[in-house]
């Protein structure tokens, strides 16, 4: 219960960092949920985030798990509202103003300028994730294989993540 | 809708104004619930287009692309931003709330229970082993997304500099994402400042 105000604060802040996607907020999410508030450990965060990639819908719904661990069902609901509320409100307002903004010359500048920054944030988040996820030759091989397969073939990524689970169980599981 | 006439004069894409007159709030909720429950493996945009443009015809392609452009240039996930924008176009604020609720509900419920199970049994050796593989695969998946996005949206050599500066700021200098976003974002936006020679938007 006493974690609820902190959950609200942290996920409202993270919400505003999700430029170009949820991964942009990942480095900050690691610092705040793991190092500052100790709601979970870094390996747990890496696992939950990765499992979340297999879930349908928005690919950040793993925040629900963090909310549940830290604050029960109230925490889970609060985290969703905190994480999606601010950006939804902003999107709703800008969506209504968009046609008026069409004649605002800076709109194109903002779009062009934020495109490379959002890709940079995606990669920065990915490298933070990789610090916890790519720990040896086997995991590096899985990561590179998934990358190459996805760039070469049109295949549902969830299937590859599932294949990663099987490979992981085979290479690291109890013998 | 008393502003319709004024909006149509100013609106560069009048298709938006007419789109989806037949959708009810419940239909919006159910359609997004279906997308939220079936869009496995990311790439929600493809599922959205398939459902909203091809199946339901609530939007035409032009409107869809325009709403996607708004979604992508604002903070927030594409999937939830699209739910807000499409819902709002179809049925105003209630449509927007129905859209985002439907979108988030299935994955949220799933991760609620997955989180509980993981909390209980996450230290089982077989699960830990499988999760190591899952996490490694997720890294590959995100890298692939970055490459595909980069191919599409990086046009100018300067873009590469902004990408690298952002990564250095977060991963090497350990600055907060917010600081890097504001600092590099501001420089990049100023770099692409409006030039007088550019012709103005979509004036017919």
Image (tube, helix red, strand yellow):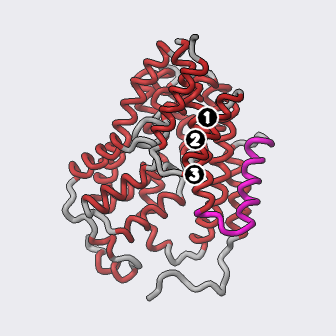
Indicate the chain on which mark 1 is placed.
Answer: A
Nearest the eye: A21 or B46: B46
B157 vs B121, left or right, is right
Q: Tags 2 and 1 in contact by the CB under 8 Å rule?
A: yes
Indicate the chain on which mark 2 is placed.
Answer: A
Q: In the picture shown, does residue B190 fall above or below A87?
A: below
Mark 2 highlights which residue? A146
Q: Residue B123: image x %, image y %? A: 55, 13
Indicate the chain on which mark 3 is placed.
Answer: A
Q: In the picture shown, does residue B102 fall above or below A49?
A: below
Q: Is residue B155 magenta?
A: yes
Q: Quadrant of the C terminus of chain B?
A: bottom left
Q: CA distance from mark 2 to mark 3?
A: 9 Å
Q: Main secondary structure of the magenta part?
A: helix
Q: Which residues are magenta?
A: B152-173
Q: In the picture shown, does residue A123 fall above or below B126?
A: below
Q: Is residue B12 magenta?
A: no
Q: Residue A104: image x %, image y %? A: 55, 75
A142 vs B47, left or right, is right
- Say which element carries label 1: helix
Q: CA distance from mark 2 to mark 1?
A: 6 Å
């Amino acid at each position: 219960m006493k974690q609820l105000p902190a959950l609200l604060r942290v996920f409202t802040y993270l919400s505003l960092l999700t430029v170009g996607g949820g991964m942009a907020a990942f480095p900050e999410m690691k610092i705040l949920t793991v190092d500052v508030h100790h709601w979970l450990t870094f390996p747990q965060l890496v696992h939950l985030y990765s499992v979340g990639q297999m879930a349908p819908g928005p690919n950040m719904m793993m925040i629900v798990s963090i909310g549940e661990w830290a604050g029960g069902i109230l925490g889970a609901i609060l985290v969703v509202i905190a994480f999606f509320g601010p950006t939804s409100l902003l999107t709703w307002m800008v969506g209504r103003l968009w046609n008026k903004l069409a004649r605002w010359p800076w709109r194109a500048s903002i779009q062009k300028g934020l495109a490379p920054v959002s890709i940079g944030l995606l990669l920065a988040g990915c490298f933070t994730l990789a610090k916890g996820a790519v720990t040896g030759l086997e995991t590096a091989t899985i990561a590179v294989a998934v990358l190459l397969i996805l760039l070469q073939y049109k295949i549902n990524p969830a299937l590859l993540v599932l294949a990663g689970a099987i490979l992981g169980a085979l290479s690291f599981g109890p013998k | 809708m008393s502003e319709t006439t004024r909006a149509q004069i100013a609106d560069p894409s009048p298709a938006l104004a007419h789109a989806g007159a037949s959708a009810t709030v419940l239909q919006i909720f159910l359609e997004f619930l279906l997308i939220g429950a079936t869009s496995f493996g990311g790439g929600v945009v493809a599922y959205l287009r398939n459902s909203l443009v091809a199946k339901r015809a609530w939007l035409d392609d032009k409107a869809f692309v325009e709403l996607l452009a708004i979604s992508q240039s604002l903070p927030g996930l594409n999937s939830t931003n699209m739910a807000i924008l499409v819902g709002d176009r179809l049925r105003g604020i209630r449509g927007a709330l129905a859209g985002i609720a439907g979108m988030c509900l299935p994955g949220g419920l799933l991760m609620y229970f997955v989180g509980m199970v993981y909390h209980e049994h996450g230290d089982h050796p077989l699960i830990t082993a499988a999760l190591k593989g899952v996490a490694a695969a997720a890294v590959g998946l995100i890298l692939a997304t970055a490459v595909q996005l980069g191919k599409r949206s990086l046009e100018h050599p300067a873009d590469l500099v902004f990408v690298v500066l952002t990564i250095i700021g977060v991963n090497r200098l350990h600055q907060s994402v917010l600081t890097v976003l504001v600092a590099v974002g501001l420089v990049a936006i100023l770099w692409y400042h409006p030039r007088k020679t550019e012709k103005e938007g979509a004036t017919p």
